[in-house]
Image: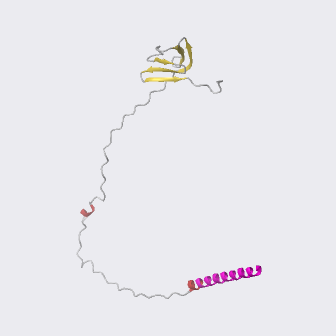
């Protein structure tokens, strides 16, 4: 049975090889077969009438003054709102907040005047600034630009 399988495989390989060789030889013969040349008669060229025989017509340049496309006008747009730049940041630095009685007081350093001030709600800091609210983690200051908040930040590596 095993010998029968081997001979079957061998015969299949021979058939496949024979078909491949036949296809290769056939395509090579087709590629190298001479092509029959077809002869086409050239058309007779007729001589055009001379310029003297033809009537010359002036170029109509008005035909070139036609628009190729029409651009639609842009839709009306609302005027862009005027953007006011944000106010400059406060130069004040909140150093600490201390509980005093039922309220809080804040220790604020002003680098412009180089002074440390201890303030509570309602007190003035420099010119035009009033402390609005002092709570346990932040201070709200009112000035000509509105309300601004200074908050305490936890130092890196500080014990909880």
Residue in the image at 63% along x and 27% along y: 156
Mark count: 0
Residue at image location 32% in from the left, 42% down from the top: 77
Position of residue 96 measured from the top left corner of the image (x, y, whole percent):
57, 18
- Front-most of residues 65 and 7: 7
Q: Is residue 139 left or right of residue 18?
A: left
The image shows residue 52, relative to residue 40, as above or below, that is: above
Task: Find residue 78 and report its image quarter.
Answer: top left
**Which residues fall within the magenta stretch?**
1-27
Q: Identify whether 87 is placed above or below 114.
A: below
Q: Who's the residue at 44% across and 23% down the image?
A: 147
The quadrant the N terminus occupies is bottom right
In which quadrant of the rendered image does the C terminus lie? top right
Horizontal and vertical percent position of residue 123: 47, 13
Residue placed most toward the observer, 71 or 47: 71
* Viewer-proximal residue among 42 and 72: 72
Q: Confirm whether the magenta stretch covers residue 14.
A: yes
- Up/down of 140 relative to 26, above or below: above
Q: Nearer the viewer, residue 77 or 63?
A: 77
Magenta span: predominant SS is: helix
Relative image position of residue 29 (x, y in whole percent): 58, 86
């Amino acid at each position: 049975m095993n010998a029968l399988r081997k001979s079957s495989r061998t015969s299949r390989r021979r058939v496949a090889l024979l078909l491949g060789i036949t296809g290769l030889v056939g395509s090579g013969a087709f590629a190298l077969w001479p092509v029959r040349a077809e002869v086409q008669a050239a058309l007779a060229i007729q001589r055009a009438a001379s310029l003297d025989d033809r009537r010359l017509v002036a170029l109509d340049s008005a035909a070139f003054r036609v628009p190729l496309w029409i651009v639609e006008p842009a839709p009306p747009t609302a005027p862009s709102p005027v953007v006011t730049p944000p106010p400059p940041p406060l130069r004040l630095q909140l150093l600490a907040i201390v509980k005093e009685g039922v309220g809080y007081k804040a220790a604020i350093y002003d680098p412009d005047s180089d002074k440390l001030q201890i303030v509570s709600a309602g007190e003035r800091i420099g010119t035009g600034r009033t402390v609005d609210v002092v709570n346990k983690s932040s201070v709200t200051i009112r000035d000509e630009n509105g309300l601004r908040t200074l908050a305490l930040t936890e130092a890196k590596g500080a014990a909880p």
